[in-house]
Image (cartoon, rainbow, N blue to C red):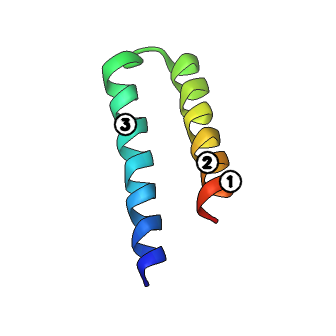
Amino acid sequence: MTKNIYVVIYVLALIALVAGVDFLFFRNRFWERLMVNISIVLMFWAFYLRFLK
C-alpha cells in the first residue's frame, strides 16, 4: 500500500515539473518544449528504475 502512495506522489511530481517548465520557460517554443519534456520523463523513468523499483 505504501509503495502505491510513493508512485502516485512520484507521478504527481513529474507532472508538476513538466507543467512548470512548460509554462515558465518554453511557452511558445514547440520543439524545444517537446525535447525538454521527453528528457524530463526519461530522467524520471531512469531514476525510478534505478532507485524505486
Residue 14 placement (x, y as % from top left): 44, 47
Q: Which mark sits nearer the N-terminus, 3 or 2?
A: 3
- Are dots 3 and 1 in contact, CB under 8 Å? no
Which residue is under mark 3? 19
Residue 31 placement (x, y as % from top left): 58, 19
Q: Locate residue 4 relative to residue 37 in the image: left or right.
A: left
Closest to the observer, 11 or 27: 11
What residue is at 67 percent from the left and 47 percent from the top?
46
Q: Which mark is residue 47?
A: 2
Q: Locate residue 23 relative to residue 40 in the image: left or right.
A: left
Q: Quadrant of residue 8?
A: bottom left
Q: Locate residue 28 relative to residue 36 in the image: left or right.
A: left
Which amino acid lies under the numbered mark 2 shown in the image of this protein? Phe
What residue is at 35 percent from the left and 43 percent from the top?
16
Which residue is under mark 1? 50
| Image quadrant in which the N terminus is located | bottom left
Query: Residue furthest toward the bottom?
Result: 1
Which amino acid lies under the numbered mark 1 shown in the image of this protein? Arg
In the image, residue 21 above or below residue 46: above
Residue 25 placement (x, y as % from top left): 37, 16
| Image quadrant in which the C terminus is located | bottom right
- Are dots 2 and 1 in contact, CB under 8 Å? yes
What residue is at 55 percent from the left and 35 percent from the top?
40
Q: Quadrant of residue 22?
A: top left
Circle nearer the viewer, 3 or 2: 2
